[in-house]
Image (spheres, helix red, strand yellow):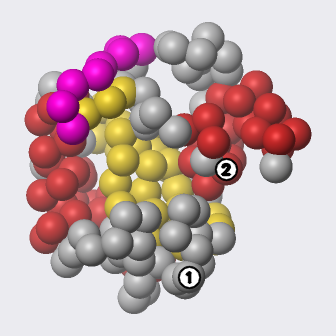
Amino acid sequence: MIALGSNLGNRELNLKTALVKMKERGISVEKTSSFIETKPYGYTDQPKFLNAVCLAETDLSPRSLLNTLLVIEREMGRIRTIRWGPRIIDLDIVFYEDLVVNEEGLIIPHPDVHNRLFVLEPLNEIAPDLIHPVLGKTVHELLMELKQRI
C-alpha cells in the first residue's frame, strides 16, 4: 500500500502523474482509493492536501521500492525544505504485504499510520480488513479508534 499526497500545483494531476510513473517503473497499481481533500498534518500553515492510497504489486524489494518512489518525487519536482511542509508529491510506503521492516531510513509499516486520518480513510475504502502486522488490528479498527481520539 502506497499513500499519495499533494498540496502544490494541480493536486489531482500530480497524484495521477505519480500513479502513471509508478506503472512505468514496474509498480502495478491494482486499486486506487478516491482522492480526498484534507487539512495539513504536522506543519499546518500551508494549503490543503489531496490524498489517496493505492494497492500496488511489485517485484521490487522494500528498499528498492522506496528508492523508486523517491526518484519519482524528485522527477516531479519535490524539494524537501520544511518537515511535513508543502509538496508537489509525497509517496509513502504504508504497508508491504505483512512485512515489518526497521532499517535506516525505512520503516514498514509506516510508523505513524494509526494517527493519520488522511491515510486511514482512503485505505479503509479499499482494504478495511487489512491487518496492521505490528498492532494486530484491521485498518477499519484503527480508523474507528482514531476517530474516537480526535
Magenta span: chief secondary structure: loop
Residue type marked 2 = Leu
Point out residue 112 in the picture as x, y percentages from the top left corner: 52, 39
Point out residue 14 in the picture as x, y percentages from the top left corner: 36, 74
Is residue 54 visible from the viewing direction of this image? yes
Point out residue 123 in the picture as x, y percentages from the top left corner: 60, 41
Q: Is residue 80 above or below residue 2?
A: below
CB under 8 Å between discs 2 and 1: no
For the record, the magenta segment spans 98-105
| Residue 124 or residue 31, whichever sits in front | 124
- As helix, strand or loop, the secondary structure at mark 2 comes to helix
- As helix, strand or loop, the secondary structure at mark 1 comes to loop
Q: Quadrant of residue 109?
A: top left
Residue highlighted by disc 1: 45
| Residue 42 or residue 93, whichever sits in front | 42
Residue 117 is marked as 2
